[in-house]
Amino acid sequence: MNHITVEPKRIAIIGAGPGGLTLAAILQRSGFQPVIYEREPYNMNRDRGGSLDIHEESGQKALEAAGLLEKFKEAARYQDQNLRVIDKNGKVYIDETDDENNWDRPEIDRGELCDLLLSAIEPNCIRYGYKLERSVLLENGTTELHFENGSTDTVDLLVGADGAFSQVRSLISDTKVEYTGVTMVELNILHAAERYPELAAYNGNGKMFAMGDQQVIIGQLNGDGRIKVYVSLKVKRDWIEQSGIPFDQPLLAKQRLLELFEDWNEMPKQYIRCAEDRLIPRRVYMLPIGYQWKRQSGVTLIGDAAHLMSPFAGEGVNLAMLDASELAAAIIRNETIHQAIQEYEENMYAYSAEKAGVTDESLRMMFSDNAAEKLADWMNQFAGAEHSEA
């Protein structure tokens, strides 16, 4: 294990999501003492997002660098990688089960993943209730941080791990996120196996995608037995406000949402009917593919702050964790922060642009005509390419 050999630098990470936590865990393992500033008053990762598939070449690679890969393998759900893809009429195009494949993308709930990362971090490393209000680049290469609670700090390296609407990004770039044309409504079916056994059996241990009419219903089994549901629609940016669906009146909202799927097969509609009485609508945003910023000597970005993309290829958390491991390795290898940032950013720009392109292709395909058939063909091509490389 490498240890720092140069004068310690003050490193601040904004955001205590998977990317920020991974970076802190790897840096601490090599003798650094970073500080994480998190805007929320406590760890809220269990309340955000559902089950995550952690990829061997990225997320698992980062966990290995943090010394957590074996613990992850003990906690991960290798059996929950099944996949069913159907069209709006219920025709099945993909029906993969865990006894048919050599799986390398085990599932873990976001909250459990973050708890695992937190177990490797000194508790006093994280400061909750610190919302970054503004930051100032100083002439000596350091950055002055000002928080809404009145606190300040001056750091040698500022890392923005603060998501889609990153405050740190606005310090070094004027580029804004773009609406992808897709809006999602998130729902939850709690205790699915006990309450709705037929639907739980249909969903299986993994994910179900139903696609048609530029609409997608996704069902995803989580570790706590819930099926998290994402109803995704290709609509205008102001659809949430203009649709007439009263999202603050859940029963009526579900009824109105079902009207959009009136001529669909009954099974995918059950994902909406059986959901709990809470709907969360949100627009899906992205940064331009290949987005880069003007390099600063003491500021950089990881995760969604650096390369926000839609969730339709499962790359978000994996890239955030890969960014963290690549940045940590660059910090450990290089004598200066400037050298570390240069090495990391050049590397990150290349692999993130490639993944962003694939993700954008996936989004366009899933909201096109004959989407289920196209997705099946696309996934079979990828599987064939991976087998030929092996």
Image (spheres, rainbow, N blue to C red):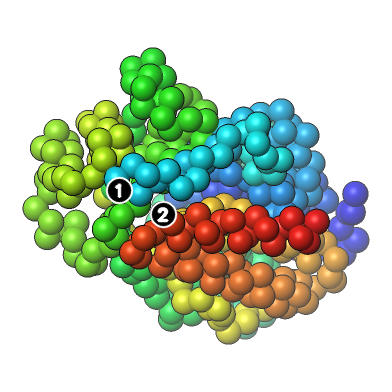
Query: Residue beneath label 2, please?
Result: 372
Q: Amino acid at mark 2?
A: Ala
Q: Residues within 10 Å of mark 2 (few under 14, many from 20)?
A: many
Marks 2 and 1 sit apart, C-alpha to C-alpha, by 9 Å
Asked whether, in this view, residue 371 is left or right of residue 333, the answer is left
Which x, y percent locates residue 19?
A: 60, 53
- Visible residue check, residue 153: no
Q: Residue at x 39, y 15 (%)?
A: 194
Which x, y percent locates residue 54?
A: 63, 45
Q: Which mark is residue 24?
A: none
Looking at the picture, tell me which residue is in the foreground, 78 or 333: 78
Which x, y percent locates residue 270?
A: 27, 33
13 lies above or below 358: above
State which tag comes first along the sequence, 2 or 1.
1
Q: Residue at x 48, y 68 (%)?
A: 361
Looking at the picture, tell me which residue is in the foreground, 242 or 267: 267
- Visible residue check, residue 285: yes
Q: Amino acid at mark 1?
A: Lys
**On the image, which quarter does residue 69 sit in?**
top right
The residue positioned farthest toward the top in the image shown: 194
Q: Of helix, strand and loop, which one carries label 1?
A: loop
Image quarter in which the C terminus is found: bottom right
Q: Which mark is residue 88?
A: 1
Q: Residue at x 40, y 71 (%)?
A: 177
54 lies above or below 156: above
Asked whether, in this view, residue 230 is left or right of residue 74, the answer is left
Q: Residue at x 65, y 55 (%)?
A: 383
Q: Residues within 10 Å of mark 1 (few under 14, many from 20)?
A: many
Which x, y percent locates residue 143?
A: 59, 71
